[in-house]
Image: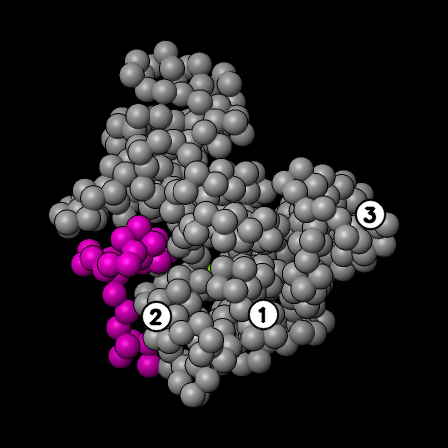
Amino acid sequence: MLDRRIVILGSTGSIGTQTLDVIERLNTAGCKFEVVGLSAGRNIDLLIKQIEHFLPLVVSVAEEEDAKSLHGRFDDLTVLSGSDGLEKLACYPDVDLVVNALVGAVGLAPTLAALSSGRTLALANKESMVIGGELVTRILREKEGTILPIDSEHNAILQSLHAGKHEEIERIIITASGGPFLNTPIDKLEDVSAAEALHHPNWSMGARITIDSATMVNKAFEVIEAHYLFDVPYEKIEPVIHPQSVIHSLVEYVDGSIIAELAASDMRIPIQYSLVYPERVATNLPRLSLEEVSNLSFEVLDMVRYPAFATVVAAGVRGGTATAAVNAADEVLVKRFLRGEIGFTKIAEGLQQIFDSWEGRADVENEDLSLARILDIDGWAREQAAKLNL
Ligand code: MG
């Protein structure tokens, strides 16, 4: 029987709530998952329900005021707050697994804290690897720690990597649905609306990641994540458009064999795999019916349709704080698009401009990478992206 003590950072978000759903299923299936700690930003009502149901020992919230009111409501509960609270929760004693389901750059410090204190990390926070990949892998090596990726693509790669040795990898193939505009005429892209962009064909996700899927920025982030998570050079990582999202990614080995992972498009499947790794547990999550799928197709990723993909991968190859710059810029540009301030194609244009001005900075050559430095560039890129005249 699997017995695990777990902390969930970002428990009220999309991945956080699905993680709790999986934990209930696992416990019904005979496992013993104990929720030791939870963290939430501003959705305090949902957090209260989660506290009442899962009875954690400790929670952390964004605002000091919310911490005070929770403290008054639950006598025996330890209540932390702010970024300091998140870091404490990430290395809370006597915990087997920390799930980082935070959204944004705020997730990097808790990732570093969890790994530094030897915790196994189930990672859904993209920014940890996208902007902090170099720092994270440094600590991983030092502490011989483990990251279990929750993102469906990397989870599929992790599963496929069990078929061979690291030196036998020929390439990693990351699938991309192509998003809602795969077949939209390219000259119409500048006029697409936020509502159209928010309609992802296969996955239900938060607003930013859905727009990032439409621009293929998300796929470029996933290439960067794969580079760090699996220690594979960029030239061996390739995207492929696979509109059905049935194959979640593949690994090709030197003998030409390609190993893929297929499953229903339900994030709870990769979440469960990271929670019970390296075992497998039967729960009643949705199953894939091959007869219903009937057709799997693949196409080359068109760089004219998705120019932001090349920009973001180039930032990854460049390394240092380049990824912090494009990530922060993208967050701002997506918000500006959702507010109707800029057109859809301006997101890619803005990203290229911010990457160019990052390249133009005198201080990024041989910079000494640290969390503070990454957050410094993050702030700079946000400011620049907010005032870009697009
Ligand atoms: Mg993904």
Residue pointed to by mark 2: 162
Residue pointed to by mark 1: 233
SS category of the residue bearing label 1: loop
Q: Is mark 1 within 8 Å of ligand 1?
A: no
Q: Residue furthest bottom?
A: 255
Q: Residue furthest front?
A: 142
Task: Report the front residue among 185 and 22.
Answer: 22
Crowding around mark 1 (Cα neighbors within 10 Å: few <14, some 14 to 19, many 20+) is some
Q: Name the N-terminal-most of marks 2 and 1.
A: 2
> Would you say 208 lies left or right of 387 here?
left
Whether 148 is drawn above or below 88: the answer is below
Which residue is rendered at x = 42% and y = 67% of the image?
A: 157
Is mark 2 in CB contact (under 8 Å) with mark 3?
no
Q: Residue furthest top?
A: 72
Q: Amino acid at mark 3?
A: Asp
Which residue is rendered at x = 55% and y = 42% of the image?
A: 108
Quarter of the image for residue 162 reads: bottom left
> Would you say 71 lies left or right of 170 here?
left
Q: Name the N-terminal-most of marks 2 and 3.
A: 2
Q: Which residues are magenta?
A: 267-294
**At which x and y percent is residue 27?**
18, 44
Q: CA distance from mark 2 to mark 3?
A: 42 Å
Is mark 3 in CB contact (under 8 Å) with mark 1?
no
Q: Is residue 286 magenta?
A: yes
Quarter of the image for residue 90 reads: top left
**At which x and y percent is residue 30?**
13, 47
**At which x and y percent is residue 231?**
52, 64
Q: CA distance from mark 2 to mark 1?
A: 19 Å
Q: Amino acid at mark 2?
A: His
Residue pointed to by mark 3: 363
Whether 273 is drawn above or below 86: the answer is below
